[in-house]
Amino acid sequence: MPTDRTTEVTRSTVARRIASRAVADREALYAAEVGRLIDAARELMASSGTTGKPRVADIVAAAGLSNEAFYRHFRSKDELVAAILEDGADRLCNYLAHQMAKKSTARDRIECWVEGVLAQADVDAARTTHAVLWNVGAVDAGIMTTPPSVGARLAELLHQPFAELGCTEPTLEAQLAAHATLGVLADHLWRQCQPTSDVVDRVIVGVLRIAGAASSMP
């Protein structure tokens, strides 16, 4: 016969398992809601461009959710805009890491990184990025500095290839390279034009020079 203590332990185990399942289900539901809000806001911003900023009501309607769902995850539209930027950084960094992993040499990985970053000025990608950045204009600075910056995250992808090329300060030099490359990207985004192949090649040479490898280029 089970003792009271055994029954208590069994009940506690069952309760934790059921509670964990309920929490997991709710987490999945909430993650789906956040994803729908981010996607809806990004699409509305892309379609509006720099002629207007979508309201929370517009975003909620496009996502097929309620105001309650919106404010369950975000205290304001500013927080949603910050999340869109963070989500975009996630996508870009994951994509670049995947593409760089296919390359066999440090130099090839760096070239892949530069090409991938500057490809964000592609007409379709640029339209969305330009619109989101325009919406960022009024976002509270405290909110925008909470997650790691895009530049810092992109720079991390260069740490290893820079070190392989013999760079003595790969973390610092990678940051310099990321800021320089993002500066070129920003110029083209605001001018709404793509970098030419010559510009891309020059940026690659510049980044390799920062890494101390330009002198050994063929």
Image (cartoon, rainbow, N blue to C red):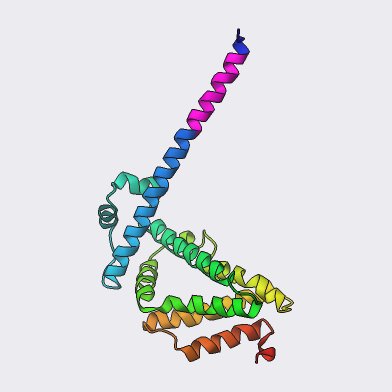
Compared to 31, does 91 lie above or below?
Answer: below
The quarter of the displayed image where residue 187 is located:
bottom left
Side of 147 where 76 appears, left or right:
left
Compared to 24, does 122 lie above or below?
Answer: below
Determine the residue positioned at 44% across, 89% down.
Answer: 196
Q: Where's the N terminus, which quadrant?
A: top right
Q: Does residue 160 show up?
A: yes
Compared to 206, does 80 lie above or below?
Answer: above
The quarter of the displayed image where residue 172 is located:
bottom right
Determine the residue positioned at 64% across, 75% down.
Answer: 104
Where does residue 176 sit, x and y in percent of width and height? 61, 78
Where does residue 46 sit, x and y in percent of width and height? 31, 69
Q: Is 58 a magenta residue?
A: no
Q: Is 12 a magenta residue?
A: yes
Magenta residues, as a range? 6-20
Side of 188 where 203 appears, left or right:
right
Where does residue 16 sit, x and y in percent of width and height? 53, 28
Determine the residue positioned at 38% across, 73% down.
Answer: 125
